[in-house]
Amino acid sequence: MSIPETQQAVIITAAGGPEVLQVTTQPVPKPGPSQVLIKVSAAGVNRHDCNQRTSGPAYGGSPIPGLEVSGQIVAAGNEVNEARGGETVCALVQGGGYAEYVVADSALALSAPERLNPIEAAAIPEALFTAWYNFFTLMKLQKDEYALIHGGTSGVGHLALQAMSALGYRVIATSGTDEKCAAALKFGAAAAFSYKDPELAQKVKDATNGQGIGALLDMSAGAHVATDFEMMAPGGRIVHLSGGGGKALTLPLRQVMAKQLWVSGSLLRPLAQARKAVIAEQLREEVWPLLGRAVRPTISHEYSLNEAASAHREMEKNSHIGKIMLVPAS
Ligand SMILES: NC(=O)c1ccc[n+]([C@@H]2O[C@H](COP(=O)([O-])OP(=O)(O)OC[C@H]3O[C@@H](n4cnc5c(N)ncnc54)[C@H](OP(=O)(O)O)[C@@H]3O)[C@@H](O)[C@H]2O)c1
């Protein structure tokens, strides 16, 4: 396949609202020794991309947003197995996904699951890498514990619920509306509650037969700290995914001590490539066989690259369930 010198890509032209996203002509990137060049079939839109946009083009390395894609390998560096040429993959990338071509580390470009279409395949990397790393690598969730996800119908949450329930874990979800709670139950949540419910901690305790939560994934920027601490089981672990613009949290130390709780946070993007490659291997082994069977992303809406601003507007309205996707013209 001949590879053009230039491509159409969305760039963040300035810090600001969705209107700062503009399609421009950019060079097609060249793969490094351990990288592949992917002709993009679809790219996922993540909340991170909206945060990157409001921070401006210099934030995060590439002015082209986009952390996950699907597509075909059309070129590769000299350390990559030649047999990968032409392979259909889905990949976690370090930015650059809102484009016709993007480079990915070869180890983070997994064979696209055959039972998913290209748009569905592009919707899975960021969510599954995030869920796996936080629940299993960091929080070491056990099957005799309960997990909880604040934001059960988010891109991350709805795929985590499906994968974890299919693997035999009991996960409770919270959401902002009744419609989203009902959707979370369909995704496999053992129970789903409004995160606005003043009785949330008691309802969660009841749903776990008094056991409480062993591992909690929180994307609410610390909106529920007091409730979280109340509903955690002794020895429970909490990971924060959203920094809420750098705000500080006040922790009830007495409860941290009495329950021996563990509170942390994580960022997937700056994680070392070698650690991401370990997650990729574990996902390939444990979750890939479930894709298109028990686990399938819900696609809320598809947009062209020219409509990237509309995609960000939809995400910031917060009415979507599942994933918002971009599809370059073929
Ligand atoms: N640190 C990392 O490595 C990492 C990796 C991936 C994602 N993330 C973060 O994880 C979150 C999800 O990402 P996404 O792309 O999947 O975004 P998304 O689909 O837009 O989801 C955002 C979610 O946050 C939930 N939420 C907002 N305010 C909340 C509150 N006060 N209490 C409970 N939940 C609340 C929303 O719940 P409702 O819709 O029900 O209101 C929604 O489910 C984002 O904050 C993103 O930045 C972090």
Image (tube, rainbow, N blue to C red):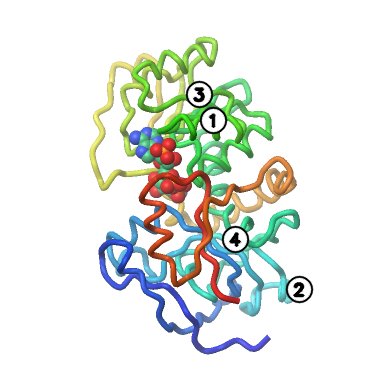
* Pointer 2 or 4: first along the chain: 2
Kind of residue sitting beneath label 4: Leu
Residue labelled with disc 1 = 182
* Pointer 3 or 4: first along the chain: 4
Residue 101, percent from left and from top: 54, 76
Mark-to-mark CA distance, 4 and 1 = 33 Å
Residue 108 shows which numbered tag? 4
Q: Nearer the viewer, mark 4 or mark 1?
A: 1
Kind of residue sitting beneath label 3: Gly
Residue 60, percent from left and from top: 36, 64
Query: Is residue 264 visible to the viewer in this orientation of the structure?
Result: no
* Pointer 1 or 3: first along the chain: 1
- Side of 86 relative to 55 (left or right): right
Element at label 3: strand
Give the residue at x 47% y 80%: 8
Residue labelled with disc 3 = 214
Element at label 4: helix
Residue labelled with disc 2 = 83
Q: Quadrant of residue 77?
A: bottom right
| Quarter of the render that holds ligand 1 | top left
Q: Is 160 drawn above or below residue 314 in the view shown?
A: above
Give the residue at x 40% y 17%: 201
Give the residue at x 50% y 30%: 181
Mark-to-mark CA distance, 2 and 3 = 43 Å
Residue 110, percent from left and from top: 66, 60
Mark-to-mark CA distance, 3 and 4 = 29 Å
Return the residue nearer the eye: 51 or 77: 51
